[in-house]
Image: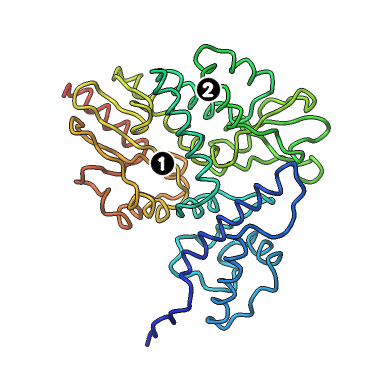
Amino acid sequence: MNHPAPPWLPDTRVVMAQLASGIREYAQQIGSAEPFRLPYPPNLQLSFDKLTQLSWHQGVAPLGSVVELLQLAHEPFGDWPISLAGVDVSADEALVSWGRPTTTCEELGALRGDVEGEMRENALMRAVMDKTRAADAPGSYVAFRKLLIEQPAITALALDQQLATAALALLADELRQAYAAAPPEAVADGMVRTCGGCQGLRLPLDGGRTWYCDDASCPAPGTAGEEHPASEGMWWLRRELRTFITGPGRAELRIAKAVERLGVPVALWPDFDTFDLSAFADRPWVADVKAWRHPARLASRLRDRLFAVPADTGQAFIVIATEQVKAQPRYLERLHKACPEVRPGQRIIAVSETDFVRRVAERAEAGT
Protein backbone atom coordinates (compact mmCIF):
# COMPACT_ATOMS: atom_id res chain seq x y z
CA MET A 1 0.00 0.00 0.00
CA ASN A 2 1.39 3.38 -1.03
CA HIS A 3 1.22 6.05 1.64
CA PRO A 4 0.95 9.71 0.62
CA ALA A 5 4.15 11.69 0.97
CA PRO A 6 4.28 13.90 4.07
CA PRO A 7 3.67 17.59 3.34
CA TRP A 8 7.19 18.55 4.41
CA LEU A 9 8.83 16.23 1.86
CA PRO A 10 10.32 18.16 -1.08
CA ASP A 11 9.51 17.24 -4.68
CA THR A 12 12.44 15.21 -6.03
CA ARG A 13 12.14 16.81 -9.47
CA VAL A 14 12.41 20.31 -8.01
CA VAL A 15 15.35 19.25 -5.84
CA MET A 16 17.26 17.91 -8.85
CA ALA A 17 16.52 21.04 -10.86
CA GLN A 18 17.83 23.14 -7.98
CA LEU A 19 20.89 20.93 -7.64
CA ALA A 20 21.63 21.21 -11.36
CA SER A 21 21.18 24.98 -11.13
CA GLY A 22 23.48 25.14 -8.11
CA ILE A 23 26.19 23.13 -9.84
CA ARG A 24 26.01 25.42 -12.85
CA GLU A 25 26.31 28.48 -10.60
CA TYR A 26 29.18 26.90 -8.67
CA ALA A 27 31.03 26.02 -11.89
CA GLN A 28 30.59 29.60 -13.05
CA GLN A 29 32.09 30.92 -9.81
CA ILE A 30 35.11 28.64 -9.66
CA GLY A 31 35.76 29.26 -13.35
CA SER A 32 35.98 33.02 -12.85
CA ALA A 33 39.15 34.98 -12.17
CA GLU A 34 38.09 35.58 -8.57
CA PRO A 35 38.94 32.95 -5.90
CA PHE A 36 35.93 31.02 -4.66
CA ARG A 37 34.61 32.07 -1.27
CA LEU A 38 31.84 30.59 0.84
CA PRO A 39 28.88 30.52 1.01
CA TYR A 40 27.97 28.11 -1.73
CA PRO A 41 25.39 29.27 -4.30
CA PRO A 42 21.88 29.29 -2.74
CA ASN A 43 20.52 26.60 -5.09
CA LEU A 44 23.39 24.28 -4.18
CA GLN A 45 22.88 24.72 -0.44
CA LEU A 46 19.08 24.41 -0.74
CA SER A 47 19.34 21.22 -2.75
CA PHE A 48 21.73 19.76 -0.14
CA ASP A 49 19.23 20.54 2.62
CA LYS A 50 16.33 19.02 0.68
CA LEU A 51 18.32 15.90 -0.27
CA THR A 52 18.98 15.46 3.44
CA GLN A 53 15.20 15.46 4.04
CA LEU A 54 14.69 12.95 1.23
CA SER A 55 17.43 10.73 2.69
CA TRP A 56 15.76 10.71 6.10
CA HIS A 57 12.42 9.81 4.53
CA GLN A 58 13.95 6.96 2.51
CA GLY A 59 16.01 5.62 5.40
CA VAL A 60 19.29 6.43 3.68
CA ALA A 61 22.31 7.90 5.46
CA PRO A 62 22.41 11.61 4.46
CA LEU A 63 25.44 13.22 2.91
CA GLY A 64 27.73 14.92 5.38
CA SER A 65 28.46 18.12 3.45
CA VAL A 66 28.08 20.03 0.19
CA VAL A 67 31.55 18.76 -0.72
CA GLU A 68 30.22 15.18 -0.55
CA LEU A 69 27.24 16.24 -2.66
CA LEU A 70 29.57 17.64 -5.32
CA GLN A 71 31.49 14.35 -5.27
CA LEU A 72 28.24 12.39 -5.66
CA ALA A 73 27.33 14.57 -8.65
CA HIS A 74 30.16 12.88 -10.58
CA GLU A 75 28.51 9.45 -10.12
CA PRO A 76 25.91 7.99 -12.53
CA PHE A 77 22.39 8.34 -11.14
CA GLY A 78 22.10 4.56 -11.09
CA ASP A 79 24.76 4.50 -8.34
CA TRP A 80 23.09 7.09 -6.11
CA PRO A 81 21.95 5.65 -2.76
CA ILE A 82 18.84 7.83 -2.75
CA SER A 83 15.85 7.03 -4.97
CA LEU A 84 15.21 9.59 -7.73
CA ALA A 85 11.82 8.23 -8.76
CA GLY A 86 9.94 10.70 -10.92
CA VAL A 87 13.06 12.51 -12.13
CA ASP A 88 13.63 12.37 -15.89
CA VAL A 89 17.16 10.94 -15.88
CA SER A 90 18.78 7.73 -17.08
CA ALA A 91 20.86 5.45 -14.88
CA ASP A 92 24.05 6.13 -16.85
CA GLU A 93 23.76 9.93 -16.76
CA ALA A 94 25.63 12.14 -14.31
CA LEU A 95 25.58 15.83 -13.39
CA VAL A 96 29.33 16.40 -13.60
CA SER A 97 31.98 14.87 -15.84
CA TRP A 98 35.68 15.70 -15.69
CA GLY A 99 34.86 18.47 -13.26
CA ARG A 100 32.38 20.21 -15.57
CA PRO A 101 28.56 20.30 -15.70
CA THR A 102 27.23 17.80 -18.23
CA THR A 103 24.53 18.31 -20.82
CA THR A 104 22.23 16.46 -18.42
CA CYS A 105 23.00 19.09 -15.79
CA GLU A 106 22.31 21.88 -18.27
CA GLU A 107 18.97 20.39 -19.29
CA LEU A 108 17.81 19.73 -15.74
CA GLY A 109 18.77 23.24 -14.70
CA ALA A 110 16.99 24.77 -17.67
CA LEU A 111 13.69 23.27 -16.52
CA ARG A 112 13.60 25.99 -13.87
CA GLY A 113 12.66 29.53 -14.81
CA ASP A 114 15.14 31.25 -12.50
CA VAL A 115 18.38 29.62 -13.53
CA GLU A 116 21.29 32.02 -13.73
CA GLY A 117 22.78 30.45 -16.84
CA GLU A 118 19.48 30.48 -18.71
CA MET A 119 18.90 34.07 -17.69
CA ARG A 120 22.31 35.07 -19.08
CA GLU A 121 21.64 33.25 -22.33
CA ASN A 122 18.19 34.78 -22.73
CA ALA A 123 19.37 38.27 -21.77
CA LEU A 124 22.17 38.15 -24.34
CA MET A 125 19.97 36.83 -27.14
CA ARG A 126 17.26 39.38 -26.33
CA ALA A 127 19.84 42.15 -26.54
CA VAL A 128 20.98 40.83 -29.92
CA MET A 129 17.38 40.66 -31.19
CA ASP A 130 16.53 44.13 -29.90
CA LYS A 131 19.59 45.71 -31.47
CA THR A 132 19.22 44.01 -34.85
CA ARG A 133 15.48 44.72 -34.96
CA ALA A 134 16.05 48.40 -34.20
CA ALA A 135 18.62 48.56 -36.99
CA ASP A 136 16.45 46.44 -39.34
CA ALA A 137 19.44 44.13 -39.74
CA PRO A 138 18.24 40.51 -39.86
CA GLY A 139 21.46 39.59 -41.66
CA SER A 140 23.44 40.62 -38.59
CA TYR A 141 21.29 38.40 -36.39
CA VAL A 142 21.86 35.42 -38.70
CA ALA A 143 25.61 36.12 -38.86
CA PHE A 144 25.76 36.24 -35.05
CA ARG A 145 23.99 32.89 -34.68
CA LYS A 146 26.14 31.26 -37.36
CA LEU A 147 29.37 32.38 -35.71
CA LEU A 148 28.33 30.94 -32.36
CA ILE A 149 27.48 27.62 -34.03
CA GLU A 150 30.45 27.33 -36.38
CA GLN A 151 33.15 28.71 -34.08
CA PRO A 152 32.46 27.94 -30.42
CA ALA A 153 36.22 28.28 -29.95
CA ILE A 154 38.00 31.12 -31.69
CA THR A 155 41.39 32.80 -31.55
CA ALA A 156 41.63 36.37 -30.33
CA LEU A 157 42.74 37.51 -33.78
CA ALA A 158 39.90 35.72 -35.56
CA LEU A 159 37.35 37.21 -33.15
CA ASP A 160 38.74 40.71 -33.77
CA GLN A 161 38.43 40.09 -37.51
CA GLN A 162 34.81 39.04 -37.09
CA LEU A 163 34.07 42.14 -35.04
CA ALA A 164 35.34 44.26 -37.92
CA THR A 165 32.98 42.77 -40.52
CA ALA A 166 29.99 44.79 -41.69
CA ALA A 167 27.53 42.15 -40.51
CA LEU A 168 28.88 41.83 -36.97
CA ALA A 169 30.24 45.28 -36.13
CA LEU A 170 26.76 46.18 -34.88
CA LEU A 171 26.97 43.36 -32.32
CA ALA A 172 30.55 43.80 -31.15
CA ASP A 173 29.60 44.23 -27.48
CA GLU A 174 27.31 41.18 -27.50
CA LEU A 175 29.96 39.02 -29.18
CA ARG A 176 32.49 39.94 -26.51
CA GLN A 177 29.94 38.93 -23.87
CA ALA A 178 29.30 35.60 -25.63
CA TYR A 179 32.91 34.44 -25.36
CA ALA A 180 35.21 34.02 -22.38
CA ALA A 181 38.93 33.32 -22.22
CA ALA A 182 39.80 29.65 -22.58
CA PRO A 183 40.20 28.12 -19.09
CA PRO A 184 43.74 27.41 -17.84
CA GLU A 185 43.09 23.67 -17.87
CA ALA A 186 42.64 23.82 -21.67
CA VAL A 187 46.36 24.60 -22.06
CA ALA A 188 49.00 21.86 -22.24
CA ASP A 189 52.55 22.31 -23.47
CA GLY A 190 51.70 25.92 -24.27
CA MET A 191 49.07 24.86 -26.82
CA VAL A 192 45.28 24.94 -27.00
CA ARG A 193 43.69 22.17 -29.06
CA THR A 194 40.31 22.23 -30.78
CA CYS A 195 37.87 19.46 -31.69
CA GLY A 196 37.45 18.66 -35.36
CA GLY A 197 33.89 17.46 -34.76
CA CYS A 198 32.35 20.57 -33.20
CA GLN A 199 35.14 23.19 -33.43
CA GLY A 200 35.06 23.62 -29.66
CA LEU A 201 37.95 23.03 -27.27
CA ARG A 202 39.48 19.70 -26.37
CA LEU A 203 40.54 19.41 -22.75
CA PRO A 204 43.57 17.45 -21.53
CA LEU A 205 43.63 14.49 -19.17
CA ASP A 206 46.60 12.57 -17.73
CA GLY A 207 48.95 15.51 -18.08
CA GLY A 208 48.04 16.04 -21.71
CA ARG A 209 48.38 12.41 -22.83
CA THR A 210 44.63 12.13 -23.46
CA TRP A 211 42.31 14.75 -24.90
CA TYR A 212 38.53 14.85 -24.83
CA CYS A 213 35.66 17.00 -26.12
CA ASP A 214 33.09 17.87 -23.43
CA ASP A 215 30.29 18.55 -25.93
CA ALA A 216 27.84 15.65 -25.50
CA SER A 217 26.25 16.37 -28.88
CA CYS A 218 29.52 16.62 -30.82
CA PRO A 219 29.17 14.61 -34.06
CA ALA A 220 32.81 13.42 -33.97
CA PRO A 221 34.28 13.92 -30.47
CA GLY A 222 37.40 11.87 -31.18
CA THR A 223 38.52 14.02 -34.09
CA ALA A 224 41.45 16.36 -33.55
CA GLY A 225 41.10 19.91 -34.85
CA GLU A 226 43.56 22.77 -35.17
CA GLU A 227 46.13 23.61 -32.49
CA HIS A 228 46.89 27.17 -31.42
CA PRO A 229 49.62 28.68 -29.22
CA ALA A 230 48.02 29.73 -25.94
CA SER A 231 50.09 32.91 -26.03
CA GLU A 232 48.05 34.16 -29.00
CA GLY A 233 44.83 34.13 -26.96
CA MET A 234 41.91 31.73 -27.29
CA TRP A 235 38.23 32.36 -26.57
CA TRP A 236 35.53 29.80 -25.79
CA LEU A 237 31.80 30.31 -26.08
CA ARG A 238 30.10 30.48 -22.71
CA ARG A 239 28.75 27.18 -21.44
CA GLU A 240 25.01 27.91 -21.65
CA LEU A 241 25.40 29.16 -25.23
CA ARG A 242 27.30 26.02 -26.24
CA THR A 243 24.44 23.90 -24.91
CA PHE A 244 21.39 25.77 -26.18
CA ILE A 245 22.71 27.63 -29.24
CA THR A 246 25.65 25.66 -30.67
CA GLY A 247 24.27 22.14 -30.07
CA PRO A 248 20.95 22.47 -31.92
CA GLY A 249 22.51 25.03 -34.25
CA ARG A 250 24.66 22.39 -35.95
CA ALA A 251 21.48 20.53 -36.89
CA GLU A 252 19.82 23.77 -38.00
CA LEU A 253 22.64 24.51 -40.44
CA ARG A 254 22.69 20.90 -41.71
CA ILE A 255 18.95 20.96 -42.35
CA ALA A 256 19.12 24.32 -44.11
CA LYS A 257 21.86 23.05 -46.43
CA ALA A 258 19.95 19.83 -47.17
CA VAL A 259 16.77 21.78 -47.99
CA GLU A 260 18.70 24.20 -50.21
CA ARG A 261 20.12 21.26 -52.17
CA LEU A 262 16.52 20.22 -52.91
CA GLY A 263 15.94 23.59 -54.54
CA VAL A 264 13.47 24.62 -51.84
CA PRO A 265 13.56 28.17 -50.40
CA VAL A 266 14.75 28.07 -46.79
CA ALA A 267 15.25 30.77 -44.16
CA LEU A 268 17.19 30.45 -40.92
CA TRP A 269 15.77 32.08 -37.78
CA PRO A 270 13.16 34.05 -39.76
CA ASP A 271 11.64 37.17 -38.23
CA PHE A 272 14.44 37.29 -35.65
CA ASP A 273 14.08 33.72 -34.42
CA THR A 274 10.31 33.30 -34.26
CA PHE A 275 11.32 29.69 -34.98
CA ASP A 276 14.54 28.10 -36.19
CA LEU A 277 13.86 27.71 -39.90
CA SER A 278 11.16 27.77 -42.55
CA ALA A 279 10.95 25.93 -45.87
CA PHE A 280 8.86 26.80 -48.95
CA ALA A 281 7.59 30.26 -49.85
CA ASP A 282 3.91 29.31 -50.12
CA ARG A 283 2.25 27.76 -47.06
CA PRO A 284 5.68 27.48 -45.43
CA TRP A 285 6.71 24.69 -43.15
CA VAL A 286 8.28 25.96 -39.95
CA ALA A 287 10.51 24.06 -37.56
CA ASP A 288 12.02 24.36 -34.11
CA VAL A 289 15.16 22.20 -33.86
CA LYS A 290 15.99 20.48 -30.57
CA ALA A 291 19.13 18.70 -29.36
CA TRP A 292 18.07 17.74 -25.82
CA ARG A 293 19.69 14.52 -24.64
CA HIS A 294 16.66 13.11 -22.78
CA PRO A 295 13.19 12.97 -24.44
CA ALA A 296 11.29 13.26 -21.15
CA ARG A 297 13.16 16.43 -20.20
CA LEU A 298 12.43 17.86 -23.64
CA ALA A 299 8.79 16.89 -23.21
CA SER A 300 8.64 18.92 -19.97
CA ARG A 301 10.11 21.89 -21.78
CA LEU A 302 7.72 21.59 -24.72
CA ARG A 303 4.66 21.32 -22.51
CA ASP A 304 5.64 24.70 -21.09
CA ARG A 305 6.97 26.36 -24.23
CA LEU A 306 5.54 25.23 -27.56
CA PHE A 307 6.04 27.96 -30.13
CA ALA A 308 3.11 29.85 -31.66
CA VAL A 309 2.35 28.73 -35.22
CA PRO A 310 1.62 31.54 -37.73
CA ALA A 311 -1.75 31.38 -39.47
CA ASP A 312 -0.26 31.00 -42.98
CA THR A 313 1.84 27.96 -42.00
CA GLY A 314 1.29 24.69 -43.82
CA GLN A 315 2.77 22.48 -41.09
CA ALA A 316 4.88 23.03 -37.97
CA PHE A 317 7.55 20.67 -36.65
CA ILE A 318 9.74 19.96 -33.66
CA VAL A 319 12.84 18.45 -35.29
CA ILE A 320 15.11 16.22 -33.22
CA ALA A 321 18.78 16.38 -34.17
CA THR A 322 20.37 13.26 -35.64
CA GLU A 323 22.86 12.87 -32.77
CA GLN A 324 20.06 12.43 -30.23
CA VAL A 325 18.08 9.96 -32.36
CA LYS A 326 21.20 7.85 -32.94
CA ALA A 327 21.97 7.83 -29.23
CA GLN A 328 18.41 6.76 -28.33
CA PRO A 329 16.60 4.94 -31.17
CA ARG A 330 13.27 5.18 -29.26
CA TYR A 331 13.67 8.92 -28.68
CA LEU A 332 10.67 10.00 -30.74
CA GLU A 333 8.45 7.24 -29.39
CA ARG A 334 9.23 8.33 -25.84
CA LEU A 335 8.79 12.01 -26.71
CA HIS A 336 5.37 11.41 -28.29
CA LYS A 337 4.27 9.44 -25.25
CA ALA A 338 5.45 12.11 -22.78
CA CYS A 339 4.18 15.05 -24.84
CA PRO A 340 0.95 14.22 -26.76
CA GLU A 341 0.90 17.82 -28.05
CA VAL A 342 3.54 16.88 -30.68
CA ARG A 343 2.21 13.50 -31.77
CA PRO A 344 1.38 12.85 -35.46
CA GLY A 345 -1.83 14.59 -36.44
CA GLN A 346 -1.23 17.62 -34.21
CA ARG A 347 -0.63 21.18 -35.39
CA ILE A 348 3.02 20.75 -34.34
CA ILE A 349 4.55 17.31 -34.81
CA ALA A 350 7.90 15.97 -33.61
CA VAL A 351 10.04 14.23 -36.24
CA SER A 352 13.68 13.33 -36.71
CA GLU A 353 16.07 15.47 -38.74
CA THR A 354 16.17 12.81 -41.46
CA ASP A 355 12.37 12.50 -41.57
CA PHE A 356 11.92 16.26 -41.87
CA VAL A 357 14.27 16.50 -44.87
CA ARG A 358 12.52 13.49 -46.45
CA ARG A 359 9.12 15.13 -46.04
CA VAL A 360 10.42 18.34 -47.61
CA ALA A 361 11.79 16.36 -50.56
CA GLU A 362 8.45 14.59 -51.05
CA ARG A 363 6.51 17.84 -51.02
CA ALA A 364 8.99 19.45 -53.43
CA GLU A 365 8.73 16.46 -55.80
CA ALA A 366 4.93 16.58 -55.66
CA GLY A 367 5.01 20.32 -56.44
CA THR A 368 2.45 21.17 -53.75
Q: Quadrant of the C terminus?
A: top left
Q: Quadrant of residue 173?
A: top right
Q: Nearer the viewer, residue 112 or 88?
A: 112
Tag 2 secondary structure: helix
- Tell me the residue at 54%/38% (across/down): 241
Q: Is residue 25 above or below residue 68?
A: above
Residue at the front extreme, as displayed: 134
- Tell me the residue at 55%/38% (across/down): 242
Q: Is residue 8 above or below residue 358?
A: below
Q: Nearer the viewer, residue 200 or 41?
A: 41
Q: How is the image coloured?
A: rainbow
Q: Quadrant of the N terminus?
A: bottom left
- Amino acid on which disc 2 is placed: Leu
Residue 287 at x, y = what percent? 32, 35
- Quickly name the residue at label 2: 171
- Quickly name the residue at label 1: 290
Q: Quadrant of residue 92?
A: bottom right
- Tell me the residue at 25%/49% (across/down): 343
- Tell me the residue at 59%/13% (across/down): 164
Mark 1 to mark 2 CA distance (whole Å) = 25 Å
Q: Are marks 1 and 2 in contact (CB under 8 Å)?
A: no
Residue 66 at x, y = what percent? 68, 66
Residue 145 at x, y = what percent? 48, 27
Q: Is residue 367 left or right of residue 339?
A: left
